[in-house]
Image: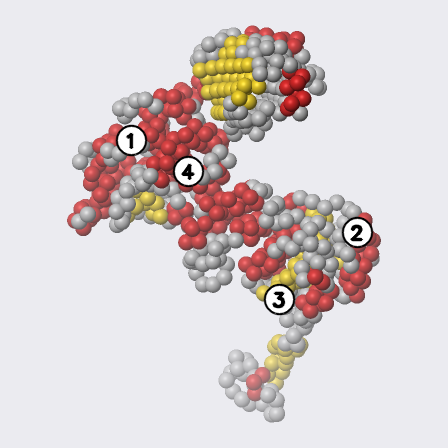
Amino acid sequence: MNSEAMDSLSILIDKIWPKIKKKHLFPQIPAPMVMESEEAVAIEMKGKQIMVNPWICEKLGQVMPKEDVVESLLDHGTSHYTYCPWDFNTHIALYSEVKKVIKDPEMVKCATGYFMDIVANTYCIKEKETKIPELYKYLDNWDSTIGSRKLDMAIFSLYQKIWGIDLNISGYDDIANRLSRIPYLDKTRWKKSIKSFSRTILCLLEVEKQEKESGNNQQNIMGEHGLSNYSGEEIEAGLRDFAGRTSSIEEFKEIISDFEDELKDLGVGNTSGMGRGKGEPIDADMLFYMKLAENYSIPIKMVPMEKNGFLHPYSHSPWEVGKPFEDIDIWTSFGKIIPGITQIWNKREGEVFGEIEGTPDCVIVIDSSGSMVNPTVNLSYAVLGAGCASDAYLRSESKVAVYNFSDANAGGKELLDFTTNRKDIYRTICRYFGGGTNLRLKDLESLRTKSKTDIFIITDMQISNLKKVIDYLSDIDNRITTVYIGNDNRFIKRFKGAVKEMQNISVYSVNKKEDIPKIVLGKIKDYFNVNPV
Amino acid sequence: MKNPFERFKDYQPKRRDIPLDRIIESKDKVMEEIIAGYEKVVEEEVKSLIWVVERNRLAEAYSRAEAVIADMDYGVEDIEEFCYELDSNEKLPYLITGPSGIYISALCNYAKENEITLNLSELQRRLHLIGYRLPAGKKLIVDGSIGNFAGARLEGGELIIKGSVGDWAGSGMRKGKITIEKYAGYHTAEWMMSGEIRVDGRIRSMGKMINGRIYEMGKPIHPLYNNSSSLDSHRL
């Protein structure tokens, strides 16, 4: 493609873009650009920017006005932004619905892409003045292989039926009849619609897959719908919502694994290091809990920190020889050093604290014994609760240490020293040992003595040395938040009975996700004079 | 004060009527009719807490279904969509799997098309009594597995299940053919009078059949064993 043709296309885009913007009610997307790579797609979107393929525009420009080609391509691209999928959240929601019908990730991506294209095109035709139908009339002129691609032919046949135009397609009536019953423009029914759509085109997707395997690799001419359309922030927010919406860790893991390469390119899941970029493989279990925990906010009761003895200027008095020069207030002394005229500040020790209130560091103690849920298989409230607690401390700029234990005496334990690295914290919290339950108090003591810390314990209380644990906790004066998973059992009753009178220990029960926000970290009973449980 | 939206005054969206609107409207109307018909059929059945499969009960429910769908104009796609509506339970107040199956069978038996393909592979629940009284000249192909009493009292039609079936498949079958591409459950062909059942996988156990031909994994197992009780003991 010569640079002259590219420049002329660029000029054409600049001319048409204001019209498109007005037509679509001024969407907040940057002006489209000319694609430099020789992709086999007419348009693609990267980071909200539409890229138009000059080569395809040139080819199609031979059979229809070039302005119409560019206008229809921009209409299509803009509709993806303004209507379907609209955002990453909707994209992933649609993708997860297709995943319930089709297992192969490439086929799922393909089905999701075609559905979004149909919705975007149909929306444009219904709501806007567009040349999209004309574009589709000439697409087979551009690409002679379309006729051999059954899926494209079925979609064209559908367009004939639902738009009421003649695209000169025959022989796909049955599939087009089924596809035409789907309410593409009803957003409230999209989830159901895309499942029905996927079920109907499944046989054609399988044919297409076989053709791809035999080397006939054809792309959707209207572009593939990858994650590069979205910004990193949008993807982070979308994953957070998705983790909150699905309680199935398996579903989340499957989808993350389907998009692993794209997510890695976008730097999702990397919380350390500078900037975004490709890093280690994504740990989907950890990412699930990280994203899910972001949906919950647990308050921390702050505590008064130490006085710092800072002296602050309080009042003036006349300076006398022998008094320190550094306390002279030059503003009220008129710049002169004369006894009787020169004023000096009298200082007093501050009656406020160095930091009025602050949040101490926290040791997260999490039970990962066999009686606890395996966080990699099912949603673990223990891991989620511990994640929410650590996030709360990290948000307060405190550090978090983790003590993950199962049969600690037999080596079933992992200690993480105080850190602000969220990824390391989650990695330690998510680890599952699955053995017996024995809390090694020496380990806990080694973390506790490093600073005046809060302690957050999450367990089902079926600890073999529970008596020792209770004795230990009753001897220390740290603020302790204890969360037990499951219903009251004899261990929990014993623990609650033993700590009933202790002012520094709060006990909460978590049986469902919604119980987590009820936890108040570091809540001391005499703050409120009520017993939380 | 200047209207900040003045620029948009002359820019009204020009909504175009497209065939999709009419298709969806008409489809939704048909679905409403099918759902209303279903509610009529089950409103009697819902009064009893437990729905027992008895000959009279089946016949009554089927007659009610026949009466309800007599004037309906629907297609195969509507039947399939209704199955998914039943499964999702969003529009329907209650799902009783027995009468639901009778109603779906009646819809298939009275459909305009002679060959009906239902893709039920994504259903969360298994529908019972699919293919009940399927008449001669009708072919029902089910993609996916279904529940008990598949092809019960088949009346000459051809039922193909591209999956497994539950218990009592082909019970009381008069004539016709049932092909099951995977497995069949207990009491297969109970009181079967005539016709043919082919199971490509294993049959859990045979019922007490009167007559007919049964094939399991490609091999004839009846009339090879004329004594059905010996067949049962062979199986169990």
| Residue contact at pointers 2 and 4, CB within 8 angstroms | no
Alpha-carbon span between mark 3 and mark 1 = 62 Å
Q: Classify residue A398 by image quadrant.
A: bottom right
| Residue contact at pointers 4 and 3, CB within 8 angstroms | no
- Mark positioned earlier in the residue sequence (1 or 2): 1
Q: Amino acid at mark 1?
A: Ser
B102 sits left or right of A223 in the view: right
- Residue A417, numbered label: 3
Figure check: A164 above or below A457? above
Residue A228 image point, x, y percent: 39, 48
**Could you classify mark 1 by the number of other residues whose Cα lies within 10 Å: few (under 14), some (14-19), or many (20 or more)?**
few
Chain ID of residue with mark 2: A
Q: Amino acid at mark 3?
A: Asp
| Residue contact at pointers 3 and 1, CB within 8 angstroms | no
Q: Amino acid at mark 2?
A: Phe
Q: Amino acid at mark 4?
A: Met
The residue at which mark 4 appears reads as A107
In the image, which is nearer the foreground, mark 1 or mark 2? 1
Chain ID of residue with mark 4: A
Q: Residue at x 42, y 58 (%)?
A: A277
Do discs 1 and 2 belong to a common subunit?
yes
**Could you classify mark 2 by the number of other residues whose Cα lies within 10 Å: few (under 14), some (14-19), or many (20 or more)?**
some
B152 sits left or right of A4 in the view: right
Q: Residue at x 54, y 59 (%)?
A: A423
The residue at which mark 1 appears reads as A148
Judged from the image, the secondary structure of the residue bearing numbered disc 2 is helix
Judged from the image, the secondary structure of the residue bearing numbered disc 1 is helix
Q: Residue at x 53, y 82 (%)?
A: A330
- Mark positioned earlier in the residue sequence (4 or 3): 4
Alpha-carbon span between mark 2 and mark 3 = 29 Å
Q: Out of A355 and A418, give the one closest to the viewer.
A: A418
